[in-house]
Image (cartoon, rainbow, N blue to C red):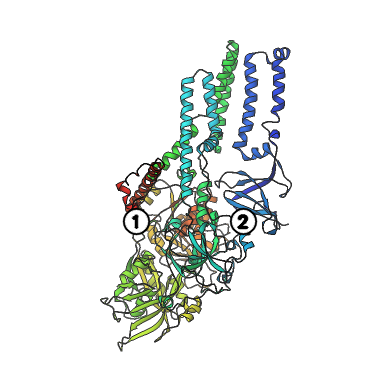
């Protein structure tokens, strides 16, 4: 039997139902009481009925007070609970076409439930039914019978073919443009900031605030009017500060949107200049560095050219990255957003620092490669990209939506608090009953007795409780901000006090970002006279400047470093450290040259390399390569020789598969350095043409498989990652406070285990769950010791021997984790593993999810884009930004100057309004007004 399609098909939506609004008179807080009030007055105004049924002033107060309270509660419940609002103010609808409203219940911590208005139109010649929830439009699919967020090409499974983007000519028809404008709207973050009054009304009907005001009213009846009025004043002031804080936060979110700027877009067969807020999915856009230095307007896919982009706004990584287009990708393959094409996406909000088309020689000849669609280049000579997503659907938009619509307030509305209050209520009711019965015996005034009883019951819930809880959270936020820790989801703060498992990434979190190049190893593998360890591993390291020509050329070509027009070299810190140790300089147009003074074994100064094409590093492939033209000095003749050279580097176990000959003791050598905590990359090369240069057109036609094959070994690049100063201290503190500390990294398992031992995550012998040595089948699984002396076969379908967990510490590789996925032993493995190595970003997320499913409260600390999924999945995600004290001082200075500038501009505006002379510019912001305001 086919599973029923939910009304709203989206993982963030728990359930939804269709409704129609009732007329105001029929609402539950009006219609029943039009009957109740006349009945009450019929009894109250009749002397006979009054004497018989009401009989006294106290009972008049009780009856009228009860009716007023009930009516008020029914009305207030429509604000407190969306289910009750639907029940009290609407009726269920039978189908989508007849419905006017939809009630949407999101998943926990994904925002508040809402009743949304259903919109209907006939744009594009067909009936469109949609609703807007949390700034996302959900469109009704008539075939599936369910609502879903607006569809984008990149959301489809399977993913679109590369040629669909390569051959795109943008939006060609006016009708199509109008339809997309109707569906997707403007490319903006439309964040309305409610007025103070509107927000205060929302806070004033909150359950606890109403209860607090009710208590104040009772105290005033009991003649506590000084205290009551002061408490009421405090409540209003406190709620006002919360409202003001919310207003300020919403204004800050609004400021995150990119101010519209002019962009060239190819529409209806010609290049047109439009504002960036009018961009639509499918538009072909020219991308470049803007005069205003604005961010990328929305999410795009590069189809021609390359760009250097600063993604610090999204990922926190301050290192600019090189983005390559899909222009040279095979058209019949599918787009891989998380794989091969990861570096072809430009994300909204990130800043383009520089764009280029191919190499300098091509630009000079005006032969920039034409894109497959035949669209001419834009007037501003920018790189070409296709718009993928706009507005709130972009990566940046999703981030802003998360911050706005995640649970904003921490409240005491949890099960433990409810049970505690119910427990206290038992005693309060017993005490009230005792006071009432004893008071009646003593013939005390009934109205005073009744008031005392109500006060006893209301005292069970301290009116100050929500105020104290909110103050605690706000104090925590303020305390964290003093340490430059900023919280986007305050509801997570109480979770931090309940953390059981603390997970850390390795590189950049426990170890520093600044890698130190130790040298090159393995260059003498296979030579009988080379010094070796007991297992045959070569532990000898050569200085980078003393290596041979091929290894030098490999290091000079296999990287993604780029020189900006301003003269800065940008790229991975590891690659910058390698180039520095090599003594080569990077120039414009991807040209590298050896310094004349560079000493070298068997190589002369003045060697030149120009990178013609890059195949960038992919975490899925674990390798990268470049095709370059090299001009080197022949060792025998001293003549200059031009060749086409391929340099590659990557994980040693990956590069091994592409070598023509694997040298003896290859594995033992790289494992020797990995066991000692080094980061090891294998280097390999080949000459595609010796003595002549391969034409750019032929290089462009090469496939990655043609380049990364039949390679020759060029040594192991050995780098050290020093521990951060406080890493050991932090982990030791967590261990001593009975927290379980786990490392999750994409690095080699031997390196990971060494670092884990350094920071005291593991202290016993470690077994690694991985494939056996030299096993290429991908089927077998074993427990291996760090020195490879122990090998125990593992059956993923069977339970794991508990003795292993009692005597050993466990390291699990991504390969081992994949084998255990879906097996019953997985939970046991997650519970006992201390180190996860060679895991993909997706697996990091799955590890956190598995720990949560077992009831652990988790913390994840990471620093890069690879950790984003895991950070979101954890109860508490700590994203580390690469910032120094100087960076924080700069941010603070910029904030002060921005505030001062705003204030000064207000003063100028006021003076101009009254025709008064403009005040002088304050000295602190004089540099912002070089020619005066």
Direction left: furthest residue: 597
Location of the N terminus by quadrant is bottom right
Say whether residue 15 is left or right of residue 337.
right
Secondary element at image label 1: loop
Real-space Cα distance between discs 1 and 2? 50 Å
Q: Is residue 492 visible?
A: no
Identified at 43% across, 61% down, the residue is: 290
Say whether residue 502 is left or right of residue 550.
right
Please identify the quarter of the rendering in which residue 646 is found: bottom left
Residue nearer the viewer, 257 or 742: 257
Please identify the quarter of the rendering in which residue 353 is found: bottom left
Secondary element at image label 2: helix
Q: Using the image, tell me which numbered label, if any, was put on residue 724.
A: 1
Decide: few, some or many residues near mark 1? Use Cα within 10 Å; few <14, some 14-19, many ≥20: some
Q: Which residue is tagged 2?
A: 183
Query: Of label 1 and label 2, which has the lower sequence position?
Result: 2
Q: Using the image, tell me which numbered label, if any, was put on residue 760.
A: none
Q: Position of residue 734 (x, y in %)?
A: 40, 48
Callout 1 touching callout 2 (CB < 8 Å): no
């Amino acid at each position: 039997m086919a599973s029923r399609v939910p009304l709203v098909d989206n993982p963030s939506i728990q359930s939804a139902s269709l409704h129609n609004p009732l007329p105001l008179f029929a609402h539950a807080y009006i219609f029943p009481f039009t009957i109740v009030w006349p009945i009450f007055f019929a009894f109250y105004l009749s002397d006979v009925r009054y004497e018989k049924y009401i009989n006294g002033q106290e009972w008049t107060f009780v009856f009228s007070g009860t009716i007023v309270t009930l009516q008020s509660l029914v009305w207030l419940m429509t604000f407190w609970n969306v289910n009750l609002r639907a029940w009290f103010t609407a009726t269920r609808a039978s189908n989508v076409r007849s419905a006017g409203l939809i009630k949407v219940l999101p998943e926990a911590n994904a925002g508040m439930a809402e009743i949304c208005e259903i919109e209907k139109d006939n744009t594009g010649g067909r009936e469109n039914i949609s609703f807007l929830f949390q700034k996302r439009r959900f469109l009704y699919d008539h075939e599936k019978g369910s609502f879903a967020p607006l569809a984008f090409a990149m959301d489809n499974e399977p993913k679109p073919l590369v040629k669909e983007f390569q051959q795109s000519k943008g939006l060609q028809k006016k009708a199509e443009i109008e339809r997309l404008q109707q569906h997707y709207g403007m490319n903006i973050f439309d964040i309305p900031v409610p007025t103070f009054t509107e927000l205060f009304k929302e806070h004033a009907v909150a359950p606890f605030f109403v209860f607090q005001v009710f208590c104040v009213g009772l105290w005033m009846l009991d003649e506590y009017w000084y205290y009551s009025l002061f408490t009421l004043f405090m409540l209003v002031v406190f709620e006002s500060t919360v409202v003001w804080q919310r207003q300020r936060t919403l204004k800050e979110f609004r400021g995150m949107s990119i101010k519209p700027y002019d962009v060239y877009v190819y529409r209806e067969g010609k290049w047109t200049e439009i504002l960036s807020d009018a961009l639509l999915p499918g538009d072909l856009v020219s991308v470049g560095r803007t005069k205003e230095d604005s961010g990328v307007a929305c999410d795009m896919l590069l189809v021609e050219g390359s760009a250097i982009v600063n993604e610090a706004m999204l990922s926190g990584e301050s290192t600019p990255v090189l983005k390559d287009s899909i222009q040279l990708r095979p058209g019949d393959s599918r787009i891989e957003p998380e794989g091969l094409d990861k570096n072809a996406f430009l994300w909204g909000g990130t800043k383009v620092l520089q764009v280029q088309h191919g190499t300098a020689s091509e630009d000079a000849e005006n032969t920039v490669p034409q894109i497959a669609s035949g669209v001419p280049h834009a007037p501003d000579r920018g790189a070409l990209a296709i718009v993928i997503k706009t507005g709130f659907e972009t990566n940046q938009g999703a981030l802003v939506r998360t911050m706005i619509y995640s649970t904003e307030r921490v409240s005491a509305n949890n099960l433990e608090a409810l049970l505690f209050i119910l427990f206290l209520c038992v005693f309060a009711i017993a005490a009230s009953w005792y006071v009432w019965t004893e008071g009646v015996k003593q013939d005390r005034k009934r109205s005073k007795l009744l008031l005392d009883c109500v006060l006893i019951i209301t005292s069970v819930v301290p009116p100050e409780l929500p105020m104290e809880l909110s103050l605690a959270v706000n104090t925590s936020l303020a305390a964290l901000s003093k340490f430059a820790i900023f919280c986007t989801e305050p509801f997570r703060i109480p979770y931090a006090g309940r953390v059981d498992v603390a997970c850390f990434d390795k590189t950049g979190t426990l170890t520093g970002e600044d890698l130190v190049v130790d040298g090159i190893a393995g260059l003498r593998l296979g030579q009988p006279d080379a010094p070796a360890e007991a297992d045959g591993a070569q532990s000898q390291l050569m200085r980078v400047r003393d290596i041979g020509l091929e290894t030098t050329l490999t290091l000079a070509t296999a990287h993604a470093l780029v020189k900006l027009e301003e003269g800065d070299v940008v790229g991975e810190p590891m690659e910058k450290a390698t180039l520095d140790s090599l003594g080569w300089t990077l120039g414009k147009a991807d040209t590298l040259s050896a310094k004349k003074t560079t000493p070298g074994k068997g190589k002369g100064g003045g060697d030149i390399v120009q990178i013609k094409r890059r195949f960038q590093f992919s975490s899925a492939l674990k390798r990268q390569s470049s095709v370059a033209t090299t001009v080197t000095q022949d060792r025998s003749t001293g003549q200059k020789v031009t060749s086409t050279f391929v340099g590659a580097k990557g994980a040693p176990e990956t590069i091994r598969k592409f070598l023509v000959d694997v040298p003896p003791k290859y594995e033992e050598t790289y494992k020797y350095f990995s066991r000692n905590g080094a980061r090891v990359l294998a280097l390999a090369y080949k000459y595609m043409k010796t003595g002549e240069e391969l034409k750019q057109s032929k290089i462009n036609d090469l496939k990655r498989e043609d380049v990364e094959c039949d390679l020759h070994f060029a040594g192991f690049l050995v780098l050290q990652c020093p521990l951060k100063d406080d890493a050991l201290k932090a982990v030791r503190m967590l261990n001593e406070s009975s927290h379980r500390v786990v490392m999750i990294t994409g690095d080699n398992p031997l390196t990971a285990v060494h670092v884990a031992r350094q920071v005291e995550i593991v202290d016993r012998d470690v077994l690694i769950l991985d494939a056996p040595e030299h096993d290429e089948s991908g089927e077998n699984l074993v427990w291996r010791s760090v020195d490879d002396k122990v090998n125990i076969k593992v059956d993923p379908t069977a339970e794991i021997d508990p003795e292993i967990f009692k005597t050993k510490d466990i390291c699990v590789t991504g390969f081992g984790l994949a084998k255990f996925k879906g097996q019953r032993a997985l939970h046991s493995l997650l519970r006992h593993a201390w180190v996860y190595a060679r895991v993909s970003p997706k697996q990091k997320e799955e590890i956190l999810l598995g720990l949560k499913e077992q009831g652990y409260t988790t913390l994840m600390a990471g620093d890069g884009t690879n950790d984003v999924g895991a950070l979101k999945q954890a109860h508490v995600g700590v994203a580390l930004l690469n910032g120094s004290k100087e960076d924080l001082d700069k941010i603070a200075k910029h904030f002060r100057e921005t505030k001062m500038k705003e204030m000064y501009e207000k003063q100028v505006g006021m003076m101009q309004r009254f025709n008064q002379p403009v005040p002088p510019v304050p000295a602190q912001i004089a540099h912002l007004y070089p020619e005066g305001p």
